[in-house]
Image (cartoon, grey):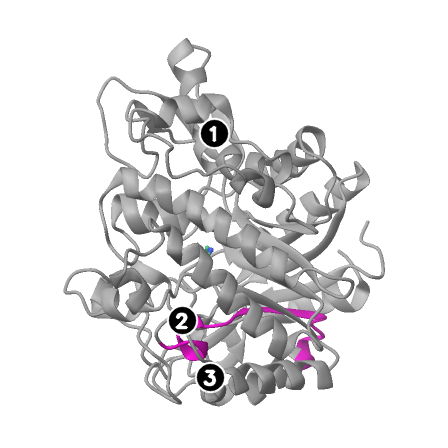
Amino acid sequence: MFDPGFLWGAATSSYQIEGAVAEDGRGPSIWDTFAATPGAIQGGDTGAVAADHYHRFPGDVALMAGLGLRGYRFSLAWPRIQPTGSGAVNQRGLDFYRRLTDTLLDQGIQPWPTLYHWDLPQPLEDRGGWPARDTAERFAEYAALVHEALGDRVTHWTTLNEPWCSAFLGYATGRHAPGRRDPAAAVRAAHHLLLGHGLAAETIRGDDSHVGITLNLTHVTPVGTEPADLDAARRIDGMQNRLFLDPLLRGAYPDDVLADLREVTGFGHVHDGDLKRIGASLDHLGVNYYAPMLVGGSSTPTQSAYVGSPLVRVADGGRPRTAMGWEIDERGLLELLLRLKDDYPAVPLYITENGAAFDDVVEHDGVHDAHRVAYLDGHLRSCAQAIGHGVPLKGYFVWSLLDNFEWSFGYGPRFGIVHVDYATQHRTPKDSARWYAEVIRRGGL
Ligand code: IFM
């Protein structure tokens, strides 16, 4: 069961909702550049306007208060604060987040900021991006500036959102900004993201500042018992989960994953002392869970985000799917949470994203998104069960508060519990928003 202090929240990210990409001194990010690349984003969509949250945040915070949210997870756009990725602060950019934070606090909503949700300042990418060690140093400098400005109002900080995506979708498959296809660069990026997290944590942590990171984790099972299937499951679990969890919570990369990755690159970019810094950095861990993975061995090599493991295929588990094509399985969340408890040192856990895109229909009397209600209900039941088994789960943020820019899929998929009409920017709480408000009011299901 959920205790009275359980943090009930909703999440968004800067580039996905803010718009105002050229206002108040904001510099370009890799997502502005990528979105302007023909063919990169479905329908040629961009985040230029998005949900116009930059201008509409007071109304959006009022909406959150109306739903009874206790926490709001948002991200800060680094290029608003340091338009070129280094040097002096752009006060107007920082002021936006000051106003947002104050408005949240006025409504009794805990601000839960993420420092980096993928919008790297373009000038840093031009100097090498995350595959370059310097980007980790720049990130720590930026984190210190933000902490200095907001540290009196924020207690819980998240450094990075889903470094797996930044590294492997950004630098290996090219599906995300900056759109590079260089597996060795992706492996270096993964390490420098973790290092950036560790360095930032050193500057932020203190009596009143707790630091976490958000990882996109999954529950991996093999499709059969053949050695190739078992090896596929080991490899995918290694790349998706353990490549990040082990350095953060055990201070070392897993040997088997290092061996898999040696096909791709050496590890000269990992310097003495890096893992010590990364491994001493967490006060809490954010878990993003959407779907499980069923995998098997393959005889046909494929290029995927799982660099170093070409002989792996993703199998069909035969379950219903969301509009993203992701299989729905709340049991996977329970298994994942139990595994975190069993395999890693205890650290408070927060579900920092969980939710689903469905093909919502706007009717004359609202958006009756029963599929989303069922999805959220099932996953919250898994959370309750996990807590019953002793998992230190302290909060849950639904993804997402608002319909928003779903990266390379553009505005097609809708994850919000609040519908956004992009032509008018009118917000309509869906049935799921009303349902979630009631869950919060009751303190559980
Ligand atoms: O929209 C994204 C979010 O930015 C990161 N986690 C997954 C979500 C759904 O794809």
Ligand 1 position by quadrant: bottom left
User: Which residue, given by chain and number where applicable, does mark 1 sit on?
Assistant: 238
Residue at image position (26%, 45%) is 173
Q: CA distance from mark 2 to mark 1?
A: 34 Å
In this picture, residue 17 sits left or right of residue 372? left
Taking 139 as reference, is 274 above or below it? above
Task: Report the span colored magenta.
Answer: 65-83
Q: Nearer the viewer, residue 288 or 34?
A: 34
Residue at 54%, 34% (x, y): give it. 219
Depth-wise, is mark 1 or mark 3 nearer the camera?
A: 3
Q: From the viewer's perspective, is residue 26 above or below residue 211?
A: below
Residue type, label 1: Gly
> What percent of the width, then of the height, locates residue 414?
42, 65
Q: Position of residue 298 (x, y in %)?
A: 29, 20
Q: Residues within 10 Å of mark 1 (few under 14, many from 20)?
A: many
Q: Position of residue 380 (x, y in %)?
A: 67, 51
| Mark seen at residue 282 | none
- Closer to viewer: mark 3 or mark 2: 2
Question: In this rendering, is residue 220 above or below 107?
Answer: above
Helix, strand or loop at mark 1:
helix
Judging depth in this view, the residue of 83 and 22 nearest the camera is: 83
> Does residue 139 appear in the picture of this structure?
yes
Q: Quadrant of the C terminus?
A: bottom right
Q: Which residue bears the numbered disc 3?
A: 93
Checking the image for residue 86, the label placed there is 2
Contact (CB < 8 A) between labels 3 and 2?
A: no
The amino acid at mark 3 is Gly
